[in-house]
Amino acid sequence: MNILLTGGMGYIGSHTAILLSEAGHQVHIYDNLCNSNIDTLNRIKKITSKDIAFTNGDIRDTEKLFNTLVNEKIEIVIHLAGLKAVGESSQKPIEYYANNVQGSISLLQAMQSANIKTLVFSSSATVYGNPVYLPYDEDHPTAPTNPYGRNKLQIEEMLHDLAVSDKAWSIACLRYFNPVGAHESGLIGEDPNGIPNNLMPVIGQVVSGKLPLLNIFGDDYDTPDGTGKRDYIHVMDLAEGHLAALNWIKNNPRLHIFNIGSGKSYSVLEIIHCFEQVSSHSIPYQVVNRRPGDLPEYYASADKAKTVLGWEAKRGLSDICNDSWRWIKNPKII
Ligand code: NAD
Ligand code: UFG
């Protein structure tokens, strides 16, 4: 199928582009490179030995999107483009609403005009907010605690209204848990512009000497070792989740929500120890105050994705650390 990946040059999009291309799909990436680098395109092509089309464009440019959808004969859109830093979203809320919510409206207008009504949307576990119970299943109440999470929920609600208004739409919202790891080639991985906020990229910068140490945000949580626990999902498992979702959604109209997580949680210290083991490097750290807004622990019930999509995470923590390490120590010259 001809698939448009908005945000396809980013971390999750680039891994998904590889998998879709290897599965025989024609992939077209649409990205404004605000948090990615054009080099990634060459790396994707090198891994797949296939041509991947690319348009440098902003999702808020409805006309450019429309022209791309029509000219490339797109059949399905996977919508990953967006700003994603939780902390920054509280400092620059209007920028986040403009980029993420307005950008999604623009995409839906372009899709409607081009009569393309099949969509996979990158949502987030952050829509759930404070756990009422764990694991979070898809029926857990939603109460996001930051503008980024509210962007995701508003987009989901908009998609719901759209699917109710017009039965021709088939939409899958994938609520990702914590994507980590890298492609097994070591040629692509997470490469954020600027100083990273998330645990894995920070560990990568400590182990490669770019940062002197890791700040652990609190060791007094009600968890076995006191540090925060999360459901880390290998980015290639996540990519496989997109493939499973698009294979299923094209025959299943309306809106469907799926958690994409592993169903397990690991603490910050468990991640550090696993990384030290696979890299044979020690990771210096200090414990600092809790980060405002962090939750002690959460993880997914991924039963719905398994039952309905036939998808489940196959890779474990040592795969995550090994693949991340291969990417981090790669000299990054193509
Ligand atoms: P990323 O920043 O690596 O990739 C996002 C891509 O979107 C970038 O290449 C960026 O240049 C592009 N982009 C942003 N705004 C754009 C715009 N207006 N027009 C065109 N392109 C634009 O992020 P990622 O980790 O790959 O995340 C992809 C999606 O998954 C995002 O929507 C994010 O909110 C969501 N998500 C990510 C995580 C995570 O922890 N990484 C968790 C849950 C959900
Ligand atoms: N942590 C540290 N030190 C750091 C960075 C993180 O101790 O330098 C800890 C955090 O306190 C938390 C854990 O590592 O306990 C994971 O933190 P991340 O920042 O890596 O990830 P979050 O769980 O806060 O959030 C991520 C994404 C969100 C997404 C969410 C989905 O940043 O965009 O996962 O579950 F919505």
Image: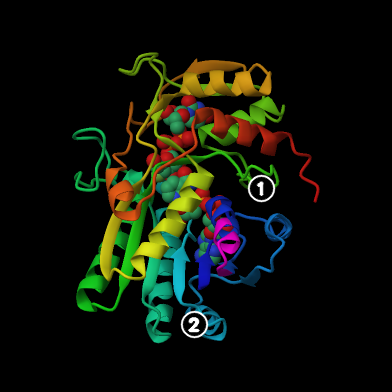
Which region is colored magenta? Answer: 19-26
> Which numbered tag is attached to residue 66?
2
Residue 51 visible in rendering: yes
Q: Earlier in the sequence, mark 2 or mark 1?
A: 2
| Residue contact between numbered discs 2 and 1, judged by CB atoms under 8 Å | no
Q: How many marks?
A: 2
Residue 23: say if magenta: yes
**Label drawn at residue 188:** 1
| Most foreground residue, 120 or 191 | 120
Q: Position of residue 131 (x, y in %)?
A: 24, 35
Report the amino acid beneath label 1.
Ile
Residue at 63 percent of width and 23 percent of height: 278
At 51% from the left and 76% from the top, the residue drawn is 61
Q: Nearer the viewer, residue 254 or 40?
A: 254
State the CA–CA distance, disc 2 to disc 1.
29 Å
Question: Which image quadrant is residue 232 in?
Answer: top left
Q: Is residue 153 above or below residue 178?
A: below
* Ligand 1 within 8 Å, label 1 CB: no
Q: Residue 290 at x, y = what percent?
A: 40, 24
The residue shown at (39%, 59%) is: 245
- Type of residue at label 2? Phe
